[in-house]
Image (tube, grey):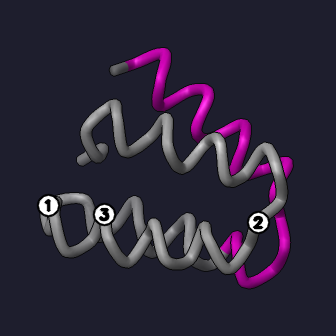
Amino acid sequence: MLPPEPQLRALQELVDIGYVRGIVKRLDQIERESPESTAFVERMRTMARGFQLDEMSGVLRRALAEA
């Protein structure tokens, strides 16, 4: 399940500027506030650890289109 749209937008902003530490902190926050989004968070966390920001941006664009 996807996190709420405001969380996705905040995450997208961090991805756009390439702030990996901020991305990880935001993912932790999303996981705390939206435990049903754990699978999404884990997928994004794996990408963040690999500095796959372009891939993260694509996933977020698709998620926001669905939201």
Residue carrying label 1:
36
Mark 2 or mark 1, earlier in chain: 2
Q: How far apart are the alpha carbons under marks 1 and 3? A: 10 Å
Vertical comparison of 21 with 17: above or below: below
Residue that carries the numbered disc 3 in the rendered image? 30
Q: Callout 1, which amino acid?
A: Glu
Amino acid found under the numbered disc labelled 2: Tyr
The amino acid pointed to by label 3 is: Ile
**52 left or right of 42 in image:** right
Front: mark 1 or 3 = 3
Q: Main secondary structure of the magenta part?
A: helix
Q: Which residue is located at x 33 percent, y 21 percent? A: 67
Magenta extent: 47-66
| Crowdedness near tag 3: few (<14), some (14–19) or many (≥20) residues, C-alpha within 10 Å | many
Image position, residue 4 (x, y; %): 25, 38
Q: Residue at x 62, y 78 (%)?
A: 46
Is the residue under label 3 in contact with that under label 1 (CB below 8 Å)? no
Residue 56 numbered mark, or none: none
Front residue of 14 and 51: 14
Q: CA distance from mark 2 to mark 1?
A: 25 Å
> Is residue 14 inside the magenta stretch?
no
Which residue corresponds to mark 2?
A: 19
Q: Position of residue 19 (x, y in %)?
A: 76, 66
